[in-house]
Image (cartoon, rainbow, N blue to C red):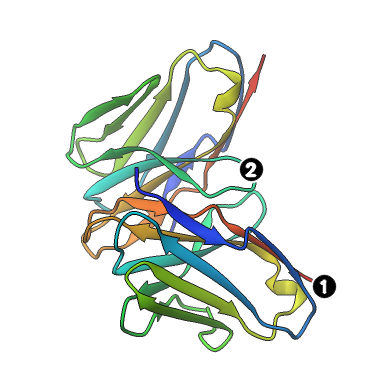
Amino acid sequence: GQQLNQSPQSMFIQEGEDVSMNCTSSSIFNTWLWYKQDPGEGPVLLIALYKAGELTSNGRLTAQFGITRKDSFLNISASIPSDVGIYFCAGHDNNNDMRFGAGTRLTVKP
Amino acid sequence: GAVVSQHPSRVICKSGTSVKIECRSLDFQATTMFWYRQFPKQSLMLMATSNEGSKATYEQGVEKDKFLINHASLTLSTLTVTSAHPEDSSFYICSAEQGAHTGELFFGEGSRLTVL
């Protein structure tokens, strides 16, 4: 199905640095979700956002549901080696369809 | 969070055989489950939506006779890859929605299928 525009595609950062990634769409979504996938495993839900403008944190992770309902970002503060993985955004629309971003591959150098 | 379990995690089969993959929601009931295929370094590609007690809804381009889906109970959906060929080798992932139309999906661990 149609994918969201997720960027960047990959990131190489030093341990301790902050990370930011985002997703945009031409469509409006009712829910934005952020997942992390480790190699060979299924995605794990990190944060779910339900209202435009909502800002939610989960430990060192912070995500926001854009005011226009067409975008969302995820920030990771003070990155650590175990943050390595692929991060996916997902949007849930009025048709009860879920769209996924292409993923952001994060590499953290110790 | 809710737990979804997939089995087997890895399976190797000969070309022409059929393989069944199970997806279970362990601590909640799921009227809807989803099956995805994931190619290396790519995002999830939705294959079909599995509806408890009714026929699955397949995405365009996905052969329903090739990928048989059964959702016989509120906690179990199965995907059977029939007459598997090497090009069917892939990582298959299921997810289940906790609550109706919440968009909150919980994913299984994934099943890596290798067809020789």
Q: Which mark is residue A39?
A: 2
Same-chain status of marks 1 and 2: no
The quarter in which the N terminus of chain A is drawn is: bottom left
Separation of marks 1 and 2 at Cα, in angstroms = 22 Å
- Label 1 secondary element: loop
Farthest residue toward the front?
Answer: B27
Name the residue located 36 percent from the left edge and 85 percent from the top edge: B55
Q: Where's residue B33, x and y in %?
A: 38, 66
The quarter in which the C terminus of chain A is drawn is: top right
- Label 2 secondary element: loop
Identify the chain of the residue marked 1, using the numbered disc in the image: B
Front residue of A11/B23: it is B23
Name the residue located 38 percent from the left edge and 74 percent from the top edge: B50
Q: Amino acid at mark 1?
A: Leu
Q: Amino acid at mark 2?
A: Pro
* Vertical side of B55 occupied by A66: above or below: above
**How many neighbours does mark 1 have within 10 angstroms: few (below 14), some (14-19), or many (20 or more)?**
few
* Vertical side of B39 occupied by B65: above or below: below
Query: Would you identify the image quadrant in which residue A80 lies?
Result: top right
Q: Where's residue A49, x and y in %?
A: 25, 39
For disc 1, the marked residue is B116
**How many neighbours does mark 2 have within 10 angstroms: few (below 14), some (14-19), or many (20 or more)?**
few
* Vertical side of B16 occupied by A93: above or below: above
Name the residue located 24 percent from the left edge and 27 percent from the top edge: A55
* Vertical side of A44 occupied by B93: above or below: below
Front residue of B60/A48: it is A48
Apparent side of residue B90 relative to residue A31 in the rendered image (left or right): right
Identify the chain of the residue marked 2, using the numbered disc in the image: A
Query: Would you identify the image quadrant in which residue B8 lies?
Result: bottom right
